[in-house]
Image (spheres, helix red, strand yellow):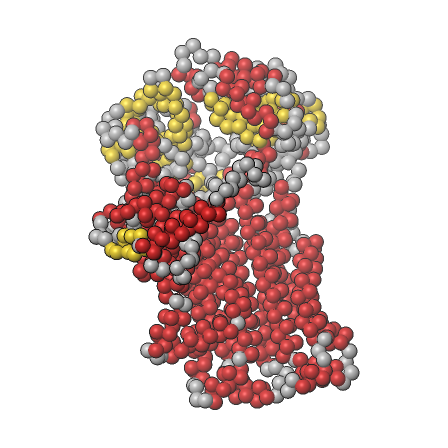
Amino acid sequence: MAPRDYPGEFEQVVLLAVARLKDEAYGMAIREEIAERTGRDVGIGSVYSALDRMETKGMVSSSLGAPTPERGGRAKRYYRLEPEGASALNRAREMFASLWDGLNLDQEAYP
Amino acid sequence: MRSMLGGSGGRNQQGPPRLAELLLRLLAPFRYREQQLGDLREAFAHRQARGGSSEACRWYRLQVLKSIIPNLALRVRIQGAPVARGLRRGMQRGGALNQDLRFTVRSVQRRPAFHLTIILVFALGIGANTIIFSVVDGILLSPLPFPDPDGLVVPWQTERGYQNSPNPTERGLADRIPLSFPIYRDWAERNSVFETLGVYRSESFYATEGSRVERVRGTRATHGVFTALRVPPSLGRTFNPEDDGLDGPRLAVLSHGWWQKRFGSDSTVVGRSLVLDGETYTVVGVMPRDFRFPDSAELWVTFSQVDHPMFTKRDANVVLPVARLRTGVTLDRAQREMEILAERLEEEKPIPGKDRGVNVVSLRDEVVGRARPELLLLLGAVGVFLLIACANIANLLMVRAWERRTEMVVRLSLGAGRGRILRQLLTEGLTLSAVGGLLGSVAAFVLLDPFLSILPPDTPRLSQVGLDHRILAFSALLTVLSGVIVSALPVLRMHGPHMATALQETNARTLGSRSRAQAQAGLLVSQIALAFLFLFSAGLLIRSFDRLTSVDRGFQAGGVIVLNVDMGGYQYVAEAQPRVAFDELIGRLGAIPGVLSVATTQVGPFLRTSTRDLIVETSQGQVTRSTHFDFVSSSYFQTMGISILEGRTFLPSETYATDPVVLVSEAVAREYWPNESAIGKRIGDSDLPERTVVGVVRDTRYRLDTDPFSLVYYPPAPWGYPTIVLKAAFDPTMVLGTLRAAVAEMDDAMTLSSLAELEDTVSSSVVGIRVRTILLGALAVLAATLAVVGVFSVLSFSVAQRTREIGIRMALGAGSGEVVGSLVWRTLTYLGAGIAVGMAVSLATFGVLGQFLFETGTLDPGILGIVILLLGTTAILAAAIPARRAASVDPVQALKLE
């Protein structure tokens, strides 16, 4: 990925959820965070698919946690926002900010 | 089983739905598999704690379904091209199979659309078979939910006098007559074939606790019912032999559900008392969660102290039997010995005017017998459909094999063994069928629940249906079989002289191999024949359904609303005057604007049926006949739109107790007084020996698929609370709300127990037939589509193959008309042969279909014409494209091709 590219919309959503959850960012927690904040009831597979994409781009990194009994003895995979991910989010935000600058759709041609 | 899929039961409280978990395990890429499974299990546990198991299962399955595509995409990304990579790894290791697979992948890559079509056709055929087989398996094949279910039987009484009766009511009863309590006693005491024999009778009770009145569906049962079914209670005990007498103790056993609802699963419930219909019963036990017999029972009580003559009369057949055969006793032997016993009893304690026999039926047949022909028809249909699909695919593969003959020959001449090539073709067929079968099974997994929801709700044992490892094994078997079938034909063509001549053929592009053409024609003809069979059967079913739903019912259902109120609570309310309240309600309903008339009926079309013995005075003297009857109010005929053919309806003042008058249906008048007026004739019954016929009304059907019953109408009876029927002036839905409010405004002891439009009731009575018709119709359209595609591909192939021959003929002066004509002629030959074979098969097998048809012959000429026209037109249209291609062959180009 060229450094000036922007993450996709769903990628941004997932990145932000990872950032919000800090040390507790694993698959289901991310899914629940998205569902709670945005009302989007996404499948767990989509979350992992996006995370995998972003891991290869260096936006996030992952590490395995300890297995817990309530997960049937399966380990969690924790994700961390990497500097590349943080700057991608910032880029996206700036891009939107500059596009929004001076616009107010409520008062213009779009009632 | 369903709980694996549907999660409706409580059996899965501990873990997530297994099949969904398995699917996720299969789909998720290795790197994330454990994480996803763990995440979902954790969230499942949370949801289960919060919202219960079924909610959690539903969520889990939805998560898995939503994750199918992302997970597949993830796999592709992680593993590059997953299949190709796996194959590449395998191929490095060498081995013939891997090579075959590599060839397969290459050939799919070369013709993706062609192979995709094949895979989809496989998926369609195998998916349809998987769904229908899982339904058949759950309903027909899986054992009843009782220990050692094979020993369970239902010993009915029969009435020989009814078997050839002109009266359909009597014929319907002839071989399944319940027992009377005294007969049950004698049978239980003296039979030598049953380990236990029990009887039961469903009743509804009012359970009261303080001022609270609740209706409960109960069943009176003897101890034999529980012993025969061999299900021990989860708490306390069931009934003992000494509890069975009519003078025994009043005891109750609770169902798990009612125990939970009413007693909050209190384990100290045994020994507590329960007031049912004002009588006190002692709770002695609770049954396990899964125990259902009969299906609707919420509790079971003893027959004790029911002070009703119907339990002491020898000819009052009011209890249903269930028994368990002694070890080693067969159904036949039970039948023979019970017949002997019944005859002996008949001599000792005869019932005048009756000729009773015995009919011992296995409980499984009793439960599922009704659904069996229906399900087997569907299973047969999807089986034939899969055959058509295989014929179609085999045809396509043969075309492909011919196209690749050069490749084969080259490989042969480079030293490949013949077995090697055959194996490769088999690998190709099996790979295609495996991918199609997998796709079909996934589709079946997703579509099973929606499919079950369109089946009629009264289908027996629907809750047993689900996908499990046996069903998947069945799909796998079908997949392998159909894979072998489709590869076998192209492979067979490779045998013998063909292999040797293949090389020469490559150079001499003249006529195609004659025997291959014959094989293709054979496949095509059988496809057309099967498609014809399908279309014709579906056409007959559609016409039959149309006749069934448009049959003259004798009444006008439009705008009629049927309403039942439950007055049972009144007897437990002090100073209640339920009769006054009921009449008051009728008055209020009649006054609602938009209601044209109100009437009452005890039975009513499509609602219930009721029969009794009548003594009829005919010109040949008195005869006793079992006849349907009803108690109706004076405005009933007007409300229902039943015309009065002769005489009059009842007067509003006439009642059953005070006025000896009856109305009869046409069928009664025709049967007993064929050539004279029925007015003034006499009919008697057990209550009153003589009543006078004052009117004759039109025959009405109480079910769509049976002839109108012989019906005798009495004026309103003083007992019970009849069903209320109303005729609405406009759209009946507009007054439903007002009706509901009118009942609610009456006092608290009266509740509305049902409210429906009669038309809805009529159409839901044929919902099973509708489903069957739609399913077969859809399969028929698909089958015909496949057959037409077959015609198209074979003709296209033959044109492509004969381009040079056509070019020569045109160069020698043949017009394009002649070329097109010969193709059309060939199409017509295939069609004619296919239809002829289809007709022959139809004639041979329509005995099977006949039982599903209503007033429709199995050789209905109209349907025959339509089907031939339909099949013919589409086949000729399919032939038109290759024909045009043939006509536009440029002779010069065609010859240059060499």
Q: Nearer the viewer, residue B297 or B8?
A: B8
Q: Quadrant of the C terminus of chain B?
A: bottom right
Q: Residue furthest front?
A: A102
**Location of residue B302 (image quadrant):** top left
* Residue B710 image position (x, y, % from top left): 60, 33
Q: How many marks?
A: 0
Q: Residue at x 40, y 30 (%)?
A: B217
Q: Nearer the viewer, residue B891 or B714?
A: B891
Q: Nearer the viewer, residue B299 or A101?
A: A101
Q: Residue at x 66, y 76 (%)?
A: B799
Q: Residue at x 32, y 27 (%)?
A: B262
Q: Is residue B764 visible?
A: yes
* Residue B197 image position (x, y, % from top left): 34, 39
Describe residue B89's horizontal placement relative to residue B754 as left or right: left
Q: Nearer the viewer, residue B790 or B725?
A: B790
* Residue B459 image position (x, y, % from top left): 47, 44
**Location of residue A48 (image quadrant):** bottom left
- In this view, B89 is above or below B407: above
Q: Is residue B21 visible?
A: no
* Residue A44 image position (x, y, % from top left): 36, 51
Q: Residue at x 34, y 78 (%)?
A: B92
- In this view, A71 is above or below B343: below
